[in-house]
């Protein structure tokens, strides 16, 4: 089945032919990967991703970037109002010599939009597994990637929990903006600020997709409160976040409690990364995000007993969306240093 998925891979190259080959500057291509929603099902859906390669020879390692609810692949490559790359995790990884593949999860952005009730943590995990197999198979270039580092944020980290535990096909995992313990105010902060995406003119004006009522998005003007508070975030980025917001399905949010108690079996090195002021997963009732050691103590036992190492990084002063924080570069650098230490 997975071989047939690889053969069926659909790739759309952005730029001149051969742009994904080794060169003097980083190159990127847009790619669609056929995926399933459950084991044994046909690969009738597609996940969009943007594959970027660093300058020079094609690397052996790719970082697979998986964003959270109401975010797409752009979370990993945010525009810098000053014209640089201060808010681009992708650029940080490329400068460190790694390839990146930033995806729109199933049901998000340019990826397929099945019925919302079928877009769940489990279908996210299976479709992500198919993406990993495609990265390894060599259908995205002359050779496959020898190592895959899974990098999640928020719900993307929850999906990474499931994928790494069920399929054991990645070499390392970075879990950012997440824990097994939620702040007691999180349900009010998040769930009360969602409404049907079809009712949001900002979203519907950017897409020709007709979404069923189980697809939700954030109410206008609420994203800083939901995801970034109390980070120092540049006004231009807050506006960008509003105009690029994506969706979440009721299928993804109706079993939060079960996700938090599901036993995990991660068998590769893990890096935890949270903002010290994350108001979804830290603080009242949440994980101890006051220090790296506190975060490891909160999470290590919940990841299974076979992870060879669990490390942590805490971005002081940051809220939930680490990549939007004014000091995002600090966490980017910590992540790349950690990848260098484990993906050899």
Image (cartoon, rainbow, N blue to C red):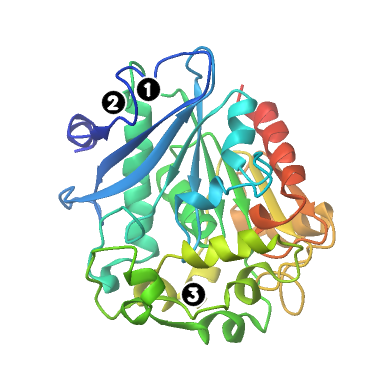
The residue singled out by tag 3 in the image is 256
Q: Residue at x 57, y 83 (%)?
A: 187
Residues marked 2 and 1 touching at CB (< 8 Å): yes
Q: Residues within 10 Å of mark 1 (few under 14, many from 20)?
A: some
Mark 1 element type: loop
Residue 197 drawn above or below residue 310: below
Mark 2 element type: loop
Label whose residue precedes the other's in the sequence (2 or 1): 2
Query: Residue 325, image x and y in percent?
Result: 72, 56
Q: Is residue 13 left or right of residue 331?
A: left
Q: Is residue 187 among the parts visible in the rendering?
A: yes
Residue 186 drawn above or below residue 11: below
Query: Residue 322, image x and y in percent?
Result: 67, 56
Q: Which mark is residue 61?
A: none
Q: Is residue 311 left or right of residue 194?
A: right
Q: Is residue 342 left or right of residue 76?
A: right
Report the Cα–Cα distance between label 3 and label 2. 35 Å
Where is residue 330, by image quadrant?
Answer: top right
The residue singled out by tag 1 in the image is 144
Q: Residue at x 32, y 23 (%)?
A: 138
Label whose residue precedes the other's in the sequence (3 or 2): 2
Depth order, front residue of 157/194: 194
The residue singled out by tag 2 in the image is 139
Where is residue 199, by image quadrant?
Answer: bottom left
Frontmost of labels 3 and 2 is 2
Give the position of the C terminus as an image quadrant.
top right
Report the Cα–Cα distance between label 2 and label 1. 7 Å
């Amino acid at each position: 089945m997975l071989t047939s998925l690889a053969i069926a891979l659909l790739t759309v190259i952005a730029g001149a032919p051969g742009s994904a080959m080794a060169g003097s500057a980083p190159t990127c291509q847009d790619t669609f990967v056929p995926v399933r929603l459950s084991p044994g099902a046909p690969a009738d859906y597609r996940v969009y991703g943007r594959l970027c390669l660093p300058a020079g020879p094609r690397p052996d390692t790719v970082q697979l970037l998986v964003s959270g609810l109401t975010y797409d692949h752009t979370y990993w490559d945010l525009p810098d109002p000053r014209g640089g790359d201060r808010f681009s995790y992708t650029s940080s990884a490329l400068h460190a010599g790694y390839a990146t593949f930033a995806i729109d999860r199933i049901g998000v952005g340019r990826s397929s939009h099945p019925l919302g009730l079928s877009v769940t943590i489990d279908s996210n995990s299976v479709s992500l597994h198919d993406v990993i197999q495609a990265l390894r198979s060599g259908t995205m270039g002359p050779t496959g990637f020898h190592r895959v580092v899974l990098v999640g944020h928020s719900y993307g980290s929850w999906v990474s929990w499931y994928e790494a535990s069920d399929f054991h096909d990645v070499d390392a995992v970075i879990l950012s903006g997440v824990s097994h313990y939620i702040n007691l105010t999180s349900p009010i902060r998040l769930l009360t600020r969602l409404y049907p995406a079809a009712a949001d003119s900002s979203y519907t004006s950017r897409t020709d997709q007709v979404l069923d009522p189980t697809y939700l998005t954030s109410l206008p003007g609420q994203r800083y409160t939901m995801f970034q508070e109390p980070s120092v975030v540049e006004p231009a980025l807050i506006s960008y976040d509003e105009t690029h917001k994506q969706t979440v399905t009721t299928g993804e949010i109706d079993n939060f409690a079960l996700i938090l108690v599901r036993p995990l079996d991660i068998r590769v090195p893990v890096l935890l990364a949270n903002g010290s002021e994350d108001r979804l997963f830290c603080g009242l009732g949440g994980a101890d995000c006051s220090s790296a050691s506190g975060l490891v103590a909160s999470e290590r036992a919940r990841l299974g007993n076979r992870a060879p190492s669990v490390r942590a990084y805490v971005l002081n002063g940051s809220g939930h969306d680490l990549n939007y924080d004014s000091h995002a570069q600090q966490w980017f650098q910590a992540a790349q240093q950690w990848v260098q230490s484990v993906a050899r």
